[in-house]
Amino acid sequence: MLDREVKRGSTEMLILALVEDRPRHGYEIAKLIEQRSEGVLQFHVASLYPLLYRLEKRGLIKGRWVEKAGQRRRRFYKLTAAGQKILAEQRQTWKDFFFALDRVAGINPA
Amino acid sequence: MPEWQAEIRKRLTGLRLGPVREAEIVEELSQHLEDLYEESLAKGCAPEVALQLTLAELNESDLFVRELRKVERRVAPEPISMNANRSGNMFSSVWQDLRYGARSLRKNLGFSLVVVLTLALGIGANSALFSVVNGVLLKPLPFPNPEQLVTLHQSKPNFDTGAIPFPNFRDLQKENRTFSAMAISRGTGFSLIGAGEAERVSGRWITSDFFTVLGVQPVIGRTFAPGEDESGAGPVALISADLWQRKFGAGQDVLGKAITLNDKNYTIVGVIPANFKLVGNVDVFVPIGQWGTPALRNRGVALGLHGIGRIKPGVTVAQAQSDLDRVMRDLATTYPDTNRNNGSKIIPLEERLVGSVRSILLMLLGAVGFVLLIACVNVSNLLLARSAGRTREFALRAALGAGQFRLLRQSLTESLILALTGGVLGLLLAGWGTRAALGVLPTTLPRTEEIGVDSRVLLFTLAISLLTGILSGLVPALKSSQGGLSETLKEGGRGASSGRVRAQSVFVAVEMALALVLLIGAGLMIRSMAAVWNVDPGFRPDNVLTFGLSLPPSMQATSGPTIRSALRELSDQLNSAPGVRAASFTDGAIPMQSEDDLFFWLEGQPKPASQSEMQMALVYRVEPGYLNVMGIPLKQGRFFTNQDDERSIPVAVIDEVFAHKHFGDQDPIGKRIHMDDGNQPSQIIGVVRHVEQWGLDSGGADSLQAQLYLPFRAYPDDSMPMGAGVVMRLDESAPSSFDSIRRIVQGQNSQSVIFRPQTMNEVIASTVAARHFSMILFDAFAVIALLLASVGLYGVISYLVGQRTQELGIRMALGAQRKNVLSLVLGQGMKMALAGVALGLIAALGLTRLMATMLFGVSATDIPTFAVITLLLTAVALFASFVPALRATKVDPLVALRYE
């Protein structure tokens, strides 16, 4: 139970962080998570998109169809102002959490 | 390439997503799968392996569906979604219709504006007129149980609603069994002396029960007690809230204070509420017993006393009528001399007050209803034209699953939005316009103080707005929702379907017909008004002034000769005032303003046994200058001179009608008539032209037409009047200001009073005010109708020309001349217009009959009016279709052909 909550909370933050700099589409997000976590974290279509839609519905990200010459149109998601705020809060929460873990159990994320 | 979309769709079926949302998700996810698949291939996987790897992404499909459902289930339905059958949420889909409609109307702002303004005009005019009808006809009278209130009259064989002699009234009051109370009253005027400048105030003699009958409570104090209306009772008075405010600052201490009316002190016992307007603006009410005229005891003299009564609960008007008939029969037996042939007549108060304007108002309401119908048809046409441009939109939505009902509802929602917006705007127009119109237009409408916007007017406006929305939106909506998908798409969404054109043509014809009916009605009203103005009143009203004059009440105590010399002096001063050509006192009747009559019999005939068997004539007591002032031609003999006074032998002048009626071919000069006043018979010395006493449009309908002139100066000393009417002819250049006249009159005695100053033209205009009022409104409605109908015709022809550009181009490319094209388009327009004219003529023949009673000097089927109006409408229609037809001839065949 805790696992799932933690995982969901953390994955939300991952997605928000990934669209922080620039808009990205779903496939790119999935690939980036896989690459940067060196394969530890993996998202399937079945889990990624419901999450994206939920984030969009909560107004944290905003999807937009973008058409580029010679390509099929793709849906790009970008961080909204509300998303920015939530991302900052979550980063702080996780920082505090890791700090606590380190003090208690000697786990240093860095 | 693998069919990702099918795979995804398979997994989404349980979710019941809107089609648009589903399409989006399918597109996004299949894109993702496609990328994965490509990547696997690029890594060197075999296609089967790549396919398996990719589909593995969807393996956890139950999780996927569960997660998606959590997110998507709560998403609001998409505005574009047309799945009425599936959504099951009526409210949200109506809201959706509203939002979609509002958005689509905002996109066509110009179109929406035209429609809203058209409807605002139509609805506003209807609301305005309804607020008048509501105030005047529908609202109950402002008295408790108003249905029990009736007016009481004494009837003669040729006159239903005569006044009641006071003794007869007392007997009716005593002997009736069906009335809970009755009262009698009569208007009068008082000189109010004391507080400030001497002032003429309007007063009313009443019996004690007057306010009890009506159920009117005083603001403060009390009304009259039983017995206070007997002669000899202490002088008490009730004053109006207005006078209370004006003279006493609305102080509570007014009760018990004295006011001086005509030199007699009255104690104020109560104040009557400001909204009491039943008998006009009356300042003081005084018990009739204070009048003191001996005629009050004369059963043969009516004195202009009219009664009101409240019938007992449960008693019908007919029962009350037969009850009073019984009393009158008994009186006729007991007092045959005065009461033979006299009966009674009771009329429900409401009928008496508003009966005369009911038909005019209802006719106007009908006319303004026509305007709204035309506005509806116009809007219908606009919506039809617009729906033609939207066939693809509707076909697409039908293809996406919108049912026919849903499309119909969407169209109707849009027309309802338009109509309700128009209604709100119209209501504002009406609220503002009604007051303004009542202020400006000549009107003698009763109960105008009750006119205004109340809940009933609001409801009416809401109802007609909804009706308008449905009426104007229904046909376009049906046309839109019925368009078959395949035909529409085949048409390329451009061509006008023949059904739509047919509907538009019918609409234009109907509009033309409605406009024609209104125009003919307006034409007949104008002809009537012109005929009325053309009636020769028998005198020349231009530059004639009339006003009332009353001498200081203090003179009452002086002798007759003193009053006579004061009046003579005034008369001389008025006659010699600068700018005055001639002036004359007048007592008795004044043409179109006041009436007075007397009984007489011809010399040589036996004196009739009772007044009811004597002859009657209108009586005018005037000075020698009267004929010059009024411009009445002398036909025979001579008119009065200053020597025809109280000392000379009694003389009289008659009019032609009198001469013809009573003397036939004989020469009336030198004949003598007896008047019922016990004096010497008067000798007829002259005959003058007949004057229209009863108003320009009476058409001789009133039976009393014979006119008798007596010299004002011949009044005997004991009955010298304390005032008189004055008529005065001014030089054409003289300013018609009363200030100089007031100075002359008050120069003689500052307590003399001048009242009710009017020009004779104003007097005449007031007799035709109701006719004038309805003519102006009717004309305004007809002009609006004509405008709307021609704009409608213009719009449809323009639209059709636009639709036929290509066809016209082909025709011209094949050699058609401009004039051929012109006549082709004109022909199409005129076909609609003439069909409408024919329809309108038939309708007008039937409908103008309804206004026959309002016409004067013109028949309801007056052929010149019908012909001129038909030509006028046809010409306007020709012009309205000529403009687009001309544009059609400018079509460049090459441009037109390139359209395809």
Image: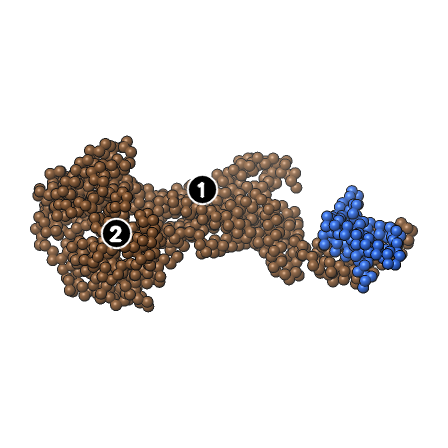
Q: Position of residue B76 (x, y in %)?
A: 67, 56
Q: Quadrant of the N terminus of chain A?
A: bottom right
Look at the image and give the colour of chain A: blue
What secondary structure is found at the residue carrying circle 2?
Answer: strand
The one of B713 and B865 positioned closer to us in this rendering: B713
Viewer-nearest of labels 1 and 2?
A: 2
Q: Chain of mark 1?
A: B
Q: Position of residue B675 (x, y in %)?
A: 12, 50
At 30% across and 46% down in the image, what residue appears? B767
Q: Quadrant of residue B183?
A: bottom left
Horizontal side, residue B729 vs residue B801: left or right: left
Horizontal side, residue A17 vs residue B43: left or right: left
Look at the image and give the colour of chain B: brown
Q: Which mark is residue B496?
A: none
Q: Which mark is residue B258?
A: 2
Label 1: how many Cα within 10 Å (few below 14, some 14–19, many 20+): some
Examine the rendering and report whether any part of residue B709 can be seen: no
The one of B714 and B894 positioned closer to us in this rendering: B714
- The type of residue carrying mark 2 is Ala
At 30% across and 41% down in the image, what residue appears? B762
The one of B112 and B284 positioned closer to us in this rendering: B284
Q: Marks 1 and 2, Cα distance to the nearest angstrom? A: 71 Å
Q: Quadrant of residue B82?
A: bottom right
Q: Position of residue B289 (x, y in %)?
A: 21, 57
Q: Which mark is residue B874?
A: 1
Question: Which badge, 1 or 2, is on the more N-terminal residue?
Answer: 2
